[in-house]
Image: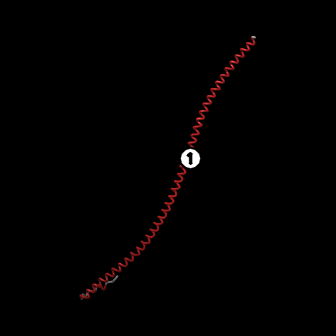
Amino acid sequence: MSRQQSLSEKWKEESKTMSSNYENLLKEAVRRERSVCLELEKVKGEMVAAITLKDHAIQNSTDQKIIITKLQAAVRQQEKQITDLNKEIDKLLQTKNNANHEKRNLLKQMDVLNVEKDRILKELNAATNQIDDLKKYTKNVFTGSESFDYMDQEVN
């Protein structure tokens, strides 16, 4: 029986070793499971953070799109106002050009009238001189004066 005892002891020894190895493997598996669970929790936290960032990015993008749409509408409104102002400026420039043309025409008419006025003033001056000469002549005729020099003058 000694052989049997020896085998039995050997088997017990191996059984203890296997049991010890199994316990070590089990402990290692539990440790790894905890480590993996911790890593999984960390990854879940990062996923939640990433989803939150994604949601914020989507909201920011939506907000930016709204702002861009509002800005585009404002730009269109300003472009319309600029177009309207340009039309008004064109009308005012046309009115100014018409006024300048009318002013030139009036200045030409005024020049013609000034020439006519000068001619009339010369005629009036000549007529006044003739009247003065006739008054002198009449005075001399009634007073008996012999001076008739004014008759020798040329009348303009």
Please report the residue visible at 56 percent of the width from the left and 47 percent of the height from the top: 62
Residue 81 or residue 96, whichever sits in front: 81
Residue 9 higher or lower than 65, as above or below? above
The x, y position of residue 139, in whole percent, is 26, 86
Q: Position of residue 138 (x, y in %)?
A: 27, 87
Give the position of the N terminus as an image quadrant: top right
**Within 10 Å of the Cα at label 1, are there few (<14), some (14-19), or many (20+) other Cα atoms?**
few
Residue in the foreground of this view, choosing between 143 and 63: 63
| Number of marks present in the image shown | 1
Give the residue furthest to the top: 2
Left or right of residue 12, residue 141 in this image: left
Scheme of image coloration: secondary structure
Position of residue 61 measured from the top left corner of the image (x, y, whole percent): 56, 46
Badge 1 is on which residue? Answer: 62
Residue 80 x, y percent position in the rendering: 52, 58
Under circle 1, the secondary element is helix
Going by the numbered disc 1, the residue's amino acid type is Thr
